[in-house]
Amino acid sequence: MKIAVSYNNGVVADCFSKTKEFKIYTAKKGQVLSQEMLDASEVKSCDLPEFLGNNEVDVVLCGGIGAKAKNALAKECIVFFPGVVGKADHQIKCFLEGSLSFNPMLSCTSMGEEKED
């Protein structure tokens, strides 16, 4: 399984659509097998879900995310967990242990969408 974390200086980025870098973790049976950085600085925000799909990502952990990005990730068959905060490596550990804390209602408005309450 490939897990992408919207990444900013070691922590989960605040807003999915503004993410310029993803940390990709390849995991199997609850263990991280490898890690790599994926540069998304040249990818338009509306193309991030397809970009992740093309990189065979199965799961995304992120901060805020808008409705359009949620729908686009779902179309790519990528499971996403919004509202994740803190150090990326710690959040991956929590995800793999089944103890990830996230907020499915956390949104960001950078794709021109109204904030979801």
Image (cartoon, rainbow, N blue to C red):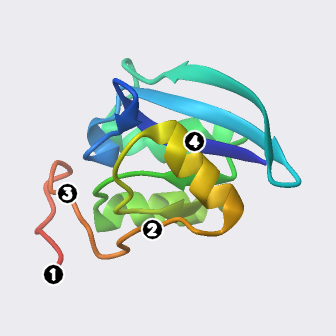
Query: How far is disc 1 from disc 2 in space, using C-alphas?
Result: 19 Å
Left or right: 88 as drawn, with respect to 63: right
Q: Which residue is mark 1?
A: 117
Inspect the image, locate mark 3, and give the three-letter code of the amino acid beneath it: Cys
Query: How far is disc 2 from disc 4 in space, using C-alphas?
Result: 16 Å
Residue 114 position (above or below residue 23):
below
Quick one: label 3, few (<14), some, or many (20+) residues within 10 Å?
Answer: many
Q: Which residue is mark 4?
A: 4
Inspect the image, locate mark 4, and give the three-letter code of the amino acid beneath it: Ala
Quick one: label 4, few (<14), some, or many (20+) residues within 10 Å?
Answer: many
**Disc 3 or 2, which lies upstream in sequence?**
2
- Disc ID at residue 108: 3
Q: Which residue is mark 2?
A: 101
**Disc 3 or 1, which lies upstream in sequence?**
3
- Image point (37%, 19%), residue name: 41
Element marked by disc 2: loop
Element marked by disc 4: strand
Q: Quadrant of the C terminus?
A: bottom left
Left or right: 114 as drawn, with respect to 74: left
- Image point (65%, 45%), residue name: 3
Kindly indicate the quadrant of the structure image that contains residue 59.
Answer: bottom right
Find out whether the residues at labels 2 and 4 contact each other: C-beta distance under 8 Å: no
Q: Residue furthest right?
A: 29
Residue 70 location (% of width, % of height): 42, 64
Query: How far is disc 4 from disc 1 in space, using C-alphas?
Result: 25 Å
**Disc 1 or 2, which lies upstream in sequence?**
2
